[in-house]
Amino acid sequence: LLLCWTLIDPLKWQREPINESDPTSTYGFCQSEGKASPVFAGLLIFVDVLALVLACAQAYRSRNMIDELTESRWLGVACASWIQVLVIGVPVVLLTRED
């Protein structure tokens, strides 16, 4: 998915001046020029959430197994931190998208 995104709609590095009178004050950012980037970003979020749901379902299915054979506790901890990243990261990305 990332390879397709890079080949179809690659990011280009751009440098913009902060102050027109001072040419040494600039900032840089990556930006795509096509319309495919939102589609690929949506697909990546979908794949990430799908993997999270499948991991949580597998941890739930293995909750009643013998403790020596299962790692559902650690899988649950990993899923909880994954959920925290999604809950905090996605809104931050959406809020800072235009900056």
Image (spheres, helix red, strand yellow):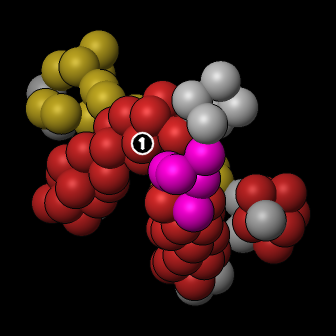
- Which residue shows up at 38% across the image and 34% down it? 77
The span shown in magenta is 61-65
- Name the spot of residue 55 as percent of width and height, x first: 58, 56
Identify the residue under disc 1.
Answer: 76
Residue 75 appears in view: no
Q: Amino acid at mark 1?
A: Gly
- Name the spot of residue 81 as percent of width and height, x first: 33, 37
Image height check: is 6 above or below 76?
below
Task: From the viewer's side, name the closer residue of 76 and 27.
Answer: 76
Task: From the viewer's side, name the closer residue of 82 and 46.
Answer: 82
9 left or right of 55 in image: right
Task: From the viewer's side, name the closer residue of 69 and 81.
Answer: 69
Give the structural element (helix, strand or loop) at label 1.
Answer: helix
83 left or right of 46 in image: left
Q: Is residue 63 magenta?
A: yes
- Which residue shows up at 79% across the image and 65% down it? 1
Q: Is residue 10 magenta?
A: no
- Name the spot of residue 42 as percent of width and height, x first: 51, 77
Residue 86 sits in quarter: bottom left
Dominant secondary-structure state across the stretch colored magenta:
loop
Image height check: is 72 above or below 42?
above
